Amino acid sequence: MLEEWPFELREVRATFVTLEKGGKLRGCIGHLEATQPLVVDITENAVAAAIHDPRFPPVSEDEMEEITMSLSILTPPEPLEVTDEAGLRACLRPGVDGLILREGRRQATFLPSVWEELPSVEDFLRHLKYKGGWAPDYWSARMAACRYQADYLSETD
């Protein structure tokens, strides 16, 4: 069945699917690492964003007409060789880079589109660390950082 899809949709890529209702986030689920064909990843993430995002109740049938969906197709994560937060801030390209922070079992990411809401590097990092369960001013030599970019497709474009 997979061979019925165009080659571009059979490529192994990582994606995020974001759902919005009235311009506000209603669900967002995805994968940071490419492990399956694009068409499969999109399908699984769309279903998961609609019914499994723990921040929201499942999307109801009554909401369907109000929901818009956007798709982020990610590049492979690129490790950043930084030793402190100042070095990380210097590497980041606002509006271009998504960021993954990892330490131990904790991990958090912001897609590049989050720069629209948090345009300063300082705010972007503070909120990402908060999302990952770290204090906003936290830094550790064990913290790993990776950046990635994304191509976007949206129903509203």
Image (cartoon, rainbow, N blue to C red):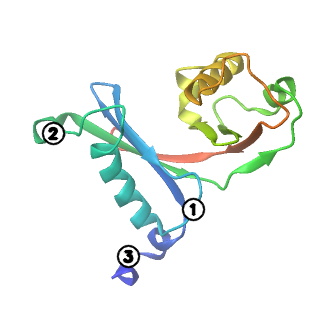
Residue that numbered label 2 is attached to: 60
Give whichever of 122, 115 is nearer the camera: 122
Residue 5 appears in the rendering: yes
Q: Residue at x 64, y 43 (%)?
A: 105
Of residues 129 and 8, the one nearer the viewer is 129
Mark 1 lies on a secondary structure that is loop
Vertical position of residue 41 compared to residue 22: above or below:
below
Is residue 16 toward the left or the right of residue 96 in the image?
left
Label 1 – label 3 distance at C-alpha: 18 Å
Residue placed under numbered mark 1 in the picture: 34
Report helix, strand or loop for mark 3. Answer: loop
Residue 39 left/right relative to 84: left
Q: Is residue 1 or residue 125 the one in the foreground? A: 125
Mark 1 to mark 2: distance in Å? 29 Å
Q: For numbered disc 2, what is the local secondary structure?
A: loop
Q: Residue at left 54%, top 62%?
A: 13
Q: How packed is label 2: few (under 14 Cα within 10 Å), some, or many (20 or more)?
A: few
For mark 3, what is the residue? 5
View extreme (front): residue: 104
Kindly identify the residue that appears in the image at 57 percent across and 62 percent down: 34
Mark 3–mark 2 distance (CA, rounded to whole Å): 29 Å
The first of marks 3 and 2 along the sequence is: 3
Amino acid carrying label 2: it is: Ser
Pinpoint residue 66: horizontal percent, then vertical percent. 19, 33
Give the left or right position of residue 123, taking residue 49 as reference. Answer: right
What amino acid type should be assigned to the residue bearing mark 3?
Answer: Trp
> Horizontal and vertical percent for residue 75?
63, 54
| Quadrant of the rendering where the C terminus is positioned | top left
Query: Is residue 157 something that shows in the picture?
Result: no
